[in-house]
Amino acid sequence: MADCQETLNELESYLDSELSEGRANEIITHLKGCTDCQGAYEFHADLRTAIKTKAKNEELPDGFLDRLRDCLGDDVLGAE
């Protein structure tokens, strides 16, 4: 069973559907019982949605994605 640290470490992989079915189920089980990790999950999921929506609807300023990657890492946005 996943604990908080494992869940937070694998949250991005879970959101990207990169975990095995068994591991994803462990993460889901932990999220259902832990409001702190559930809050982190909701934040990351909402952030991804906001970035994707913004990126589709408006032209981003030069260098924006590079600065965002510097803050969040390639795992969040993927490599270009």
Image (tube, rainbow, N blue to C red):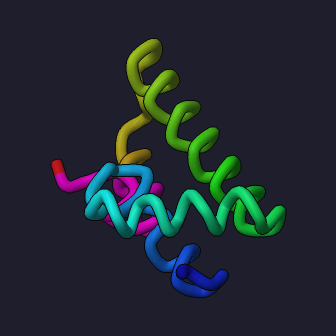
In magenta stretch: residue 72 = yes
- Where does residue 30 sit, x and y in percent of width and height? 64, 68
Q: Which residues are magenta?
A: 66-79
Which residue lies most toward the right here? Answer: 35
Q: Residue at x 57, y 44 (%)?
A: 45
Residue at position x 76%, y 64% in the image = 33
x and y percentages locating residue 8 in the rendered image: 57, 75
**Viewer-side residue, 39 vs 20:** 20
Main secondary structure found in the magenta portion: helix
Q: Is residue 74 left or right of residue 6?
A: left
| The one of 2 and 67 positioned closer to us in this rendering | 2
Q: Is residue 52 left or right of residue 36?
A: left
Find residue 69 and report its image quarter. bottom left
**Residue extending furthest toward the left:** 80
Occupied quadrant, residue 24: bottom left
The image shows residue 17, relative to residue 49, as above or below, that is below
4 magenta-colored: no
Quadrant of the drawing holding the N terminus = bottom right
